[in-house]
Amino acid sequence: MLDKELQLINKYTNHYKTVNLKISKSSVGWHLDHSLKVINLVNDTIKKSKESEFKKEFSGLRLLTFTFGFFPRGKARSPKRVLPPEVILKEDIKNQLKIAKVDLKSFKALDDNQFFTHPLFKQLNKRQTQKFLKLHTNHHLKIIKEILR
């Protein structure tokens, strides 16, 4: 899961200081750090969840986002716990990447209705969480590609 995305994150790590204000006020490193924080936090959260506590709820925003396969830029605000620090270090990105690679290997073993609760999309089961992580990571990778052009 996310193998291609994690390879791209690794590739872009060398450009972590690059900024292009026409595309984003944040650096490549910010987008990498944020993406990895989301992957690792979501992975930790879903592992700790209890399948019996999953409640299927409709979310129109989730339906639209997952159907069209992208997040609109600049519309959502990230929770503080997944915001990068003021100073982003290449070593921190590399360490988070190592954690993500190891932790995501155990994702397949999760029960189908273990879940992660998203602030806008509500509870996401295993399949929905995979989709969210892919969409979210690709959203930031797309911005990074534009910054580097």
Image: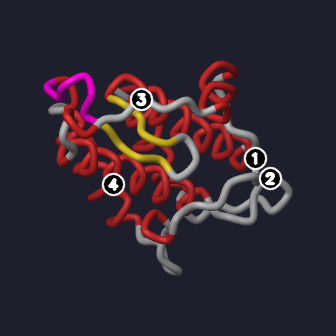
Q: What element carries label 2?
A: loop
Q: In which quarter of the image is residue 43?
A: top left
Query: Which dot, 3 or 2, sits closer to the camera?
Result: 3
Is 52 covered by the magenta stretch? no
Q: What stretch is highlighted in magenta?
A: 109-114
Work out whether 23 lies above or below 77: above
Residue at label 1?
A: 73
* Residue 23 - label: 2
Q: Relative to the observer, which residue lies in front, 65 or 136?
A: 65
What amino acid is found at the position of numbered circle 2 in the picture? Ile
Q: Residue furthest bottom?
A: 86
Badge 1 crowding class, 10 Å Cα cut-off, few under 14, some 14 to 19, many 20 or more, is few
Residue at label 3?
A: 56
For the residues bearing labels 3 and 2, Cβ distance under 8 angstroms: no
Work out whether 65 lies above or below 121: above
Q: Main secondary structure of the magenta part?
A: loop
Q: Which x, y percent locates residue 41?
A: 33, 54
Q: Which x, y percent locates residue 129?
A: 40, 33
Q: What's the distance in space between the residues labelled 2 and 4, CA to CA?
A: 26 Å
Q: Is mark 3 on a helix, strand or loop?
A: loop
Residue under the image location 19 percent in, 34 percent down? 52
What amino acid is found at the position of numbered circle 3 in the picture? Lys
Q: Residue furthest top?
A: 67
Q: Relative to the observer, which residue lies in front, 2 or 124?
A: 124
Residue at label 4?
A: 41
Q: Which residue lies furthest to the right in this view?
A: 22
Q: Looking at the image, tell me whether mark 3 or mark 4 is earlier in sequence order.
A: 4
Q: Quadrant of the C terminus?
A: top right
What amino acid is found at the position of numbered circle 1 in the picture? Arg
